[in-house]
Image: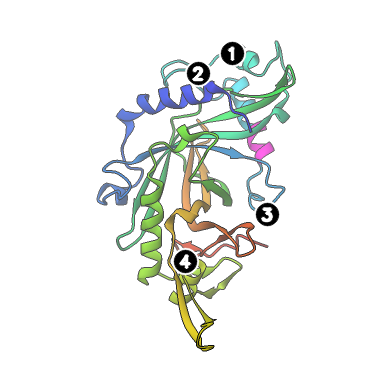
Amino acid sequence: MKYLPGIFVIASVFILSCHNEKKADTESSNIRINLLLPTSVPVSQLFMFDTSGIPGWQQELKAAHVVEKIFGKVMNSEITVFNSNTDDSVKCTKEEILNNMGVQAEPLNLNEIKSLFFEEEWFLDTTEPFLFEKKVLCWYPVRYYQRDGQELKKLIFKVAKGKPAELLAKNVIYEFNLEDTINPSFIKNLDNNKITRLLIDFAVSGKTKLWNPMNIDHELSAEEIRKNLGQAIDTTYIEDPETGKSEQKIQKQEINPSEIQSIVFVEDWYYDPSTFAIKKVIKGIGPVRHYLKTDGEMAKTVVFMMYLGNEKTKIFE
């Protein structure tokens, strides 16, 4: 998949412009230590609407309705949005929006808006109680269109300020790649090895209940968790050609943190009706192991589901 170079420039400019706004989103994170870095970590994400491969992952997020609603409010001057290439001091005009959408006048082809681009700050503390927070700094609707036989993407405008408190969607489920080879700048500030080790160490510590992703009513034992993470002991017998006797050989496979290459998140999203700023509240986390099977094929599996509250959400129907 190709991405516009402009997206990376915008992301870099925005990260620099948001340094003055690095305040924790909740009081709890103000008194905790972020184990990812001394301060919260800037992370970018392209959130795709299409989940046809995994039905139900975003069924409560009515993407088309959200897009139609915000564009309607913006074009009617009911809310203020900002220029994608600048900080929050430069408002985005109707003329700029029309130009970014490739038209000279309304109506807009909103079917071309197929994803949202988020700028976030991540905060993780694995001491008890476990805390994982995302602070959405801003987000952009992304237009997908064809030109000269190429698929291009364009950020239309930026939504930044507000106090999101009204529920937008429950149980928004998606997979976040920790190793983004297409857009490494999205996660350049994220220490993949550290975050995976923190999650694994917490998982095997026995400090919290972890659940089977395929059956969230089944609590996983410590042995099951280690097995799902790839730890195994295999016993084989090799015959000595000289003596004819069989010798026992034990092979131990340890947990390899580098196999955790993505994370499944379950979140509730909130928004501010007056600005359409969005807030994400993490409810569930599932590390995804990418590994080579004995037959040589690559596979991946959600190792476990950890829920940050009393509500457990199915990630597979």
* Spot occupied by residue 161 in the image (x, y as percentages of width and height): 43, 30
Query: Mark 3: which amino acid?
Result: Gly
Tell me the element at label 1. helix
Per the image, the residue denoted by label 4 is 310
Q: Distance between the residues labelled 3 and 4?
A: 21 Å
Tell me the element at label 4. loop
Residue 248 visible in image: yes
In the rendering, which numbered label is found on residue 83?
Answer: 2
Placement of 74 over or under 94, stated as above or below? below
Marked residue nearer the N-terminal end (4 or 2): 2
Q: How far apart are marks 1 and 4 (CA)?
A: 45 Å
Marked residue nearer the N-terminal end (3 or 2): 3
Q: Do the residues labelled 3 and 1 touch (CB within 8 Å)?
A: no
Q: Distance between the residues labelled 3 and 1?
A: 35 Å
Marked residue nearer the N-terminal end (2 or 1): 2
Marked residue nearer the N-terminal end (3 or 4): 3
**Label 2: few (<14), some or many (≥20) within 10 Å?**
many
Per the image, the residue denoted by label 1 is 96
Q: Distance between the residues labelled 4 and 2?
A: 40 Å
Tell me the element at label 2. loop
Query: Mark 2: which amino acid?
Result: Asn
Per the image, the residue denoted by label 3 is 56
Front in this rendered view, residue 184 or 53? 184
